Amino acid sequence: MEIILQEDVEKLGTRGQVVNVKEGYARNYLLPRKLAIVADASNMKRLEKMRAAFAKKEATERESAQKQAEQLSAVALKLSRKAGENEQLFGSVTAGDVADALKAQGYEIDKRKIQLDVPIKTIGEFPITLKLYRDIAAIVKLTVEREA
């Protein structure tokens, strides 16, 4: 089934792109969430107008993501957690914890944009990558210390 993407979909395509997907994926996931529309004759005619609107929207999103990345590059986060003798945390620091710490400093970042390969389980300093837009990322320094 051919569809036109209205939003960027990870591992599928970008806005305005015509892609071929399985019918169930389109019907049950993409279409109800308004991530895509069916690529019929009328929608294909509207595609050029849609691409112009997508380009304008992309430019503003890219610009705001660039500004936010510049602001976030100066941010340093500090979290206190209970830890054992050999600096192992009781629990871990996850993307949700980092999102909450950023929110406390006034930055509204979705936890899905925070890229942690594995949860942080030791005390120390860690660089945290925030994927703000397709190719725009910011690195925030996170310090995890022992709770007093």
Image (cartoon, helix red, strand yellow):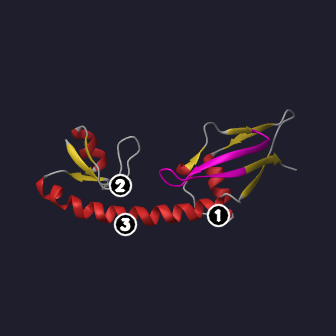
Residue 78 appears in the picture as rendered: yes
Q: Which mark is residue 71?
A: 1
Q: Which residue is mark 3?
A: 56
Left or right placement of residue 124 versus residue 112 in this view: right
Seen at 37% across and 66% down, the residue is 56
- Earlier along the polypeptide chain: callout 1 or callout 3? 3
In terms of depth relative to the viewer, which is nearer, 68 or 98? Answer: 68
Seen at 73% across and 50% down, the residue is 142
Left or right placement of residue 16 versus residue 107 in this view: left
Element marked by disc 3: helix
Q: Which mark is residue 7?
A: 2
Q: Give the CA distance from mark 2 to mark 3.
A: 13 Å
Element marked by disc 2: loop
Asked if residue 80 is positioned above or below residue 70 in the image, the reply reads above
- Earlier along the polypeptide chain: callout 1 or callout 2? 2
Mark 2 vs mark 3: in front: 3
Q: What type is the residue that disc 1 sits on?
A: Gln
Whole-percent x, y for residue 128 in the image: 66, 47
Q: What type is the residue that disc 3 sits on?
A: Lys
Q: Give the CA distance from mark 1 to mark 2.
A: 26 Å
- Labels 2 & 3 near each other (Cβ < 8 A): no
Seen at 44% across and 67% down, the residue is 60
Whole-percent x, y for residue 97 in the image: 66, 51
Whole-percent x, y for residue 43 in the image: 17, 57
Left or right placement of residue 32 versus residue 85 in this view: left
Element marked by disc 1: helix
Q: Give the CA distance from mark 1 to mark 3.
A: 23 Å
Asked if residue 110 is positioned above or below residue 93 in the image, the reply reads below
Per the rendered image, the range of residues in magenta is 122-141
